[in-house]
Amino acid sequence: MLCKICKAKGKREKAVIFIRHHRLALCKKHFLEWFQKQTLKTIKHFSMFKKNEKIGVAVSGGKDSLSLWQLLTEAGFETVGIHISLGIDTEDYSKKSLNLCQKLAEKINKPLIVFDLKKEFEHTIEEIAKLSGRKDICSICGTFKRYIMNKVALKENLYAIATGHNLDDESAVLLSNTIRWEIGYLGRQYPVLHEREGFARKVKPFCFLTEKEIVSYAILKGIDFMETGCPNAKMATSPAYKQALAYLEHKMPGTKLRFYKEFLKKAKPIFEKETKEEYDLTPCKICGMPTTADICSVCRILEKIRGVDA
Amino acid sequence: MLCKICKAKGKREKAVIFIRHHRLALCKKHFLEWFQKQTLKTIKHFSMFKKNEKIGVAVSGGKDSLSLWQLLTEAGFETVGIHISLGIDTEDYSKKSLNLCQKLAEKINKPLIVFDLKKEFEHTIEEIAKLSGRKDICSICGTFKRYIMNKVALKENLYAIATGHNLDDESAVLLSNTIRWEIGYLGRQYPVLHEREGFARKVKPFCFLTEKEIVSYAILKGIDFMETGCPNAKMATSPAYKQALAYLEHKMPGTKLRFYKEFLKKAKPIFEKETKEEYDLTPCKICGMPTTADICSVCRILEKIRGVDA
């Protein structure tokens, strides 16, 4: 297959990727251009952030977040990487993840802030889950990650935290919330989460790009990334929704993109009206971070582990 | 596996069916009881119709509609079958369908009204589609079926038309409308469609029962039904949505029922508010049936075929 853009210019260049739902075959050069343009369009459309604003990129070591960091940096944004080291030993998962983030930081010559759970809280994420007696490690891990990201954003005075969530992630979460008709979640799901008292602004510049497109970008850009997912995530249900969408996408190319875009345009405003933010935030009595209770959920878990409440 | 109800009574009876999402194994007797009870509960919950009201059951010759007719009749409702003979020759489809409806009519001793397209309109549905130059035969067929059902309901003074739509149908339509965020359709999808000037009341008493449950009922009740679908329906997209839901159901039993029930409870009222019926109905200048235009779509197609507009 030939690159569509080269062909239009009378040149014959082999395509490296075929983006089925856009019916677009592109060579390396034009794919990388297209990919960056799509990302910048999303940033602009949702007024995510501007050139003079300092952005934290949450980097896990995976293809999505590392690609995002390199792209934003190359596009001239003021970025800093933030990596949370969870202390997962299985297959050296956390050590390898950190190394890949450090490697990219050197390559693009940008600072990487590392938050080491074991150092800061005396325990790895698996120890925290075990000691607190909770089996849902993914949910605990999410709570800690959100907490730490907010804390770092505050400390470093960041305008926003950018995450590598892609179209496959966003459409799977959307399908999951839709199948269960979680009106509250549906009213809030959006590529931008606005900042409020102590909560950082969160943005998802890759929300319209697929996993396949991002992995192609990462490979063509020579980015080294973790190819295996977190060893603790095996029990997650989102793969089922991803599979169901992959099937529909296969039968009807463009399903995922249309599903998510039409949601943002037509359904999200309707659900938003039904979604009332009923809670008030106060500073946590221990750490000072915003919470709906006296003590925030992270401090509550940490206190329990330290035996204060035990 | 043993029947759960028999077991609770201290008896050991082999189950003929296991309803996975209810974790319910039942013998023939208790399954048939359960199935009828579920249907009657749905009829009552949505105030579909009562014992003294004359109901038309739209029978195609398939498992759903024939099972519904037999069940409603046995439960003591005043029923009449309505069959539209489309004139489809492939595999003797229409002839076989009619025979199966007639066979059940005799068995349950109820009248069957047959509307023969060729006799009434001089053409079979395939001829109508071809002559009118439209390729979407399923959509034309739907238009004609709705029109004829309304006409028969009016003529026979029926309180409602009951159709055999099941949970697999309803959840697939729901998923299709949701994936495309068709707010208008979502605001209207419901087990009851209320009557209005010339449009009959439509009800779906099987909307919470699965295809598997209905086919089991039909077999256990000795109902002969068409095992092949319409030969023209091969191109329909709904099988893709059915497949995607079947996959989610397999991974998470109860998905389909929860998806549809939660929709009716939580989402449908929200979409309904956004859905305005903006059209006015006037009698068709040719046939007198209600329409939003001067001439209804069926008369328009028939006129075109007859060469008036051609």
Image (cartoon, coloured by chain):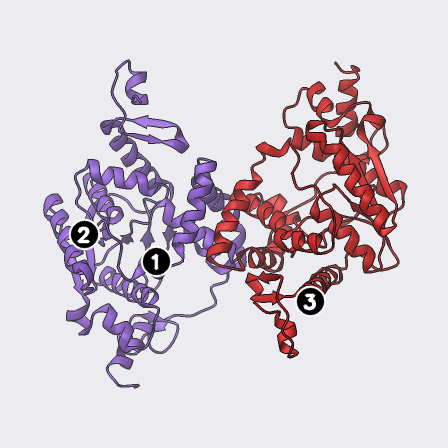
Chain colours: A purple, B red
What residue is shown at x 70% (from left), y 35% (from top)? B142
What's under tag 1, amino acid-wise?
Glu
Quadrant of the image occupied by residue B226: top right
| Secondary structure of residue under mark 3 | helix
Q: Position of residue A119 (x, y in %)?
A: 14, 70
- Against A133, is A42 above or below? above
User: Total number of numbered labels?
Assistant: 3
User: Which one is closest to the eye, mark 1 or mark 2?
Assistant: 2
For the N terminus of chain B, the quadrant is bottom right
Query: Gap in Å between the C-alphas at discs 2 and 3?
Result: 66 Å
Query: Gap in Å between the C-alphas at discs 1 and 2?
Result: 18 Å
Q: Is residue A93 left or right of residue A263?
A: left
Q: Please give the residue where the numbered disc 3 appears in the rendered image.
A: B30
Q: Which mark is residue A195?
A: 1
Q: Is residue B268 left or right of residue A39?
A: right
Mark 1 crowd level (few <14, some 14–19, many ≥20, 10 Å Cα): few
- The answer to which of B256 and B104 lies nearer the viewer is B104
Residues at discs 3 and 1 both on one chain: no
Q: Which mark is residue A80?
A: 2
Q: Position of residue B300 (x, y in %)?
A: 76, 24
Q: Is residue A124 left or right of residue B42?
A: left
- The answer to which of A76 and A58 lies nearer the viewer is A58
What's under tag 3, amino acid-wise?
His
Chain to which mark 2 belongs = A
For the C terminus of chain B, the quadrant is top right
Q: Position of residue B274 (x, y in %)?
A: 62, 49
| Secondary structure of residue under mark 1 | loop
